[in-house]
Amino acid sequence: MTPAAGMRLSHLLSKTLRQAPADAETVSHQLLLRAGMVYPGASGVYSYLPLGWRAFKKVENIIREEMDRAGGQEALFPSLQPLELWQETGRDAAFGATMFSIEDRRQRRLVLGPTHEEVVAQIARSFVKSYRDLPVLVYQIQNKFRDELRPRGGLLRGREFSMKDLYSLDADEASLDHSYQLMIDAYRRIYERCHLPVVLVEADSGAIGGKESHEFTALTPTGEDEIIHCPACGYAANLEKAQGGTGDPPTEAPLPLEEIATPGVKTIEGLARFVGVPTSHTLKAVFYSADGRVVFTAIRGDLEINETKLKNLLKCHELRLATEDEVARAGLVAGSASPLGLTGIPTVGDESIALGANLVAGANREGYHVKNVTYPRDFQVDTVADIAAAAAGQGCPHCSAPLKAERSIEVGHVFKLGTFISQKLGASFLDREGVSHPIVMGSYGIGVGRLLAAIVELHHDERGITWPPSVAPYQVYLCPLTGDSSQVAQAAEELYQQLQGAGVEVLYDDREESPGVKFNDADLIGIPLRLVLSRRSLEKGSAEVKRRTEKQPSLLPIEGLAAQVKALLTQT
RNA sequence: CGGGGUGUAGCGCAGUGGCAGCGCGCAUGGUUUGGGACCAUGAGGCCGGCGGUUCAAAUCCGCCCACCCCGACCA
């Protein structure tokens, strides 16, 4: 057996910090910094220090093993990519300023790869010529570069971060479905092996026009995302994707329009109070600027617009609320705006406007509103679509039980890309009949560092990290309380050698520190099994063994201890 | 980019115009050793940067930079 890695704490590069740096707020960020696992370089950029790197590699290897098991072929694609490649698919615009862009000495523009669909499609173009060459699953684990609007939470969202990205190449949709399912199953095994409970949610497939997308999310109050799920039927989606509930639409038959004076009423709440109806009986107008042109949206008063849905619908890159100026220039009256008689600007209505009749809407006249507005009797819009934001408490779109919202961390994303990129890049193959088709692509990402941080978010206590053994940097924390006893030191040295000989990864606290310091560091670093050797225990011919998650240690005879420990470790 | 905040020793912080400080950590010596020990002596600073006001600036003014938090975005 090859001796496993051991490390003497006295020689470890990093040291633990008693206090976390003040600007670290997320639990995983604080603990990873305090335990000396990572070190900040720039905003959203981190070094992995030896302990953190070992944990990272554990996670990485789990991912690699499961990708290989699913039939993935590991490769490595370049980070430096010519900008032209991105211009060919038009995704340089979609990514915009998020792409790091540099210039070489010949003034040629290069980007630091934020993802690799283009590169893979380009390679596939050279090698995949026949339906016989498909399907292919190819992946890499490599640093990605994204100039995020706001990095946060340490490893949770960085600007340089390691990602496992796998790309599926298939001949048709059915085959893509199969690859997609393979990946979902592989992902489930990965999170299971990392002891990270996840929820699979429907996700927004973005402006690229992919047909289906799911996210794996880890539920934690410190998460940066919100997911919507139904406790009754199991429906789950992220906030961008979730279908809004139906709420409480008015049910009476349409009545004639009636203009009413509403002096001073500017908000939906004020309007509902003034007229004496619930907000779900009002019609709200919201104006956006989509790539510079004003768009009018109408939605029921109790609902909010989901800007991601709207953005996807409009296929625009930049979407923001229109300024008062822009609204006025479009001939609209903010606060009393209405779809009634509106012409000349694009209009989008949420599906909710068609659910009932007799809504109270603006009159496009300062201080006036109109009652009994009914779609489509009284007004039309260019598009009716689901652009409403889901929220906790709304009825589930499938079973109408009240929806719940939870904070979560996105730890994986699978995506049916389709043929968008392969078409643009001319990556096609010939089928049995000799007919050319674009390759059907899928892409599947896991942020390795984010996954690591998510594990810490869910595996810690007030003393520090409680690594699941499968991803712990070492399996055993060997902790001699030397005192003035050279016997203890000698026994510890021997045990250190024996453990390594038995194939146990051991972090050996050979420092001359007081017991309190050692115990606290052991808890902070979070190695699953702690072995304490002291004069007290030696007198009984034994050592203390304690799991990180246990309160009380137990005594094990020092004779044959290495083998015993080995057995303990394989137990879980 | 909008809003909020912070930059003083490795980390945490005090210092509102007059000698650059405290706790932890670090070094040396000694005493300690079952949950962050004690004594003594030390090392460590361009007070984020540039400019201005002043006899005198960490401190007041201006500009810039970096970093953090909330939002849009994402693995």
Image (tube, rainbow, N blue to C red):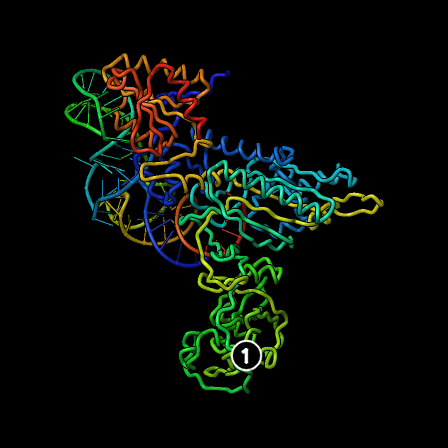
- Can the viewer see residue A378 in this picture? yes
Residue for point 35% across, 29% down = A15
The crowd level at tag 1 (other Cα within 10 Å; few <14, some 14-19, many 20+) is many
Disc 1 marks which amino acid?
Ala
Res A500 → quadrant: top left
Depth order, front residue of A343/A529: A529
Horizontal side of A254 relative to A557 (left or right) equals: right
- Which residue lies under the disc numbered 1? A357
Residue for point 61% across, 33% down = A69
Res A461 → quadrant: top left
Judged from the image, the secondary structure of the residue bearing numbered disc 1 is: loop
Horizontal side of A194 relative to A525 (left or right) equals: right
Depth order, front residue of A474/A85: A474
Q: Locate residue A474, reporting x and y percent.
A: 42, 26
State the quadrant of the C terminus of chain A: top left
Number of disc labels:
1
Depth order, front residue of A156/A375: A375
Asked if residue A553 is positioned above or below residue A304 in the image, the reply reads: above
Res A460 → quadrant: top left
- Can the viewer see residue A364 in this picture? no
Q: Locate residue A379, reporting x and y percent.
A: 60, 79
Depth order, front residue of A161/B61: A161
Horizontal side of A127 relative to A33 (left or right) equals: right
The extreme right residue here reads A433
Q: Locate residue A512, reporting x and y percent.
A: 28, 20
Chain letter of disc 1?
A: A
Horizontal side of A572 relative to A295 (left or right) equals: left
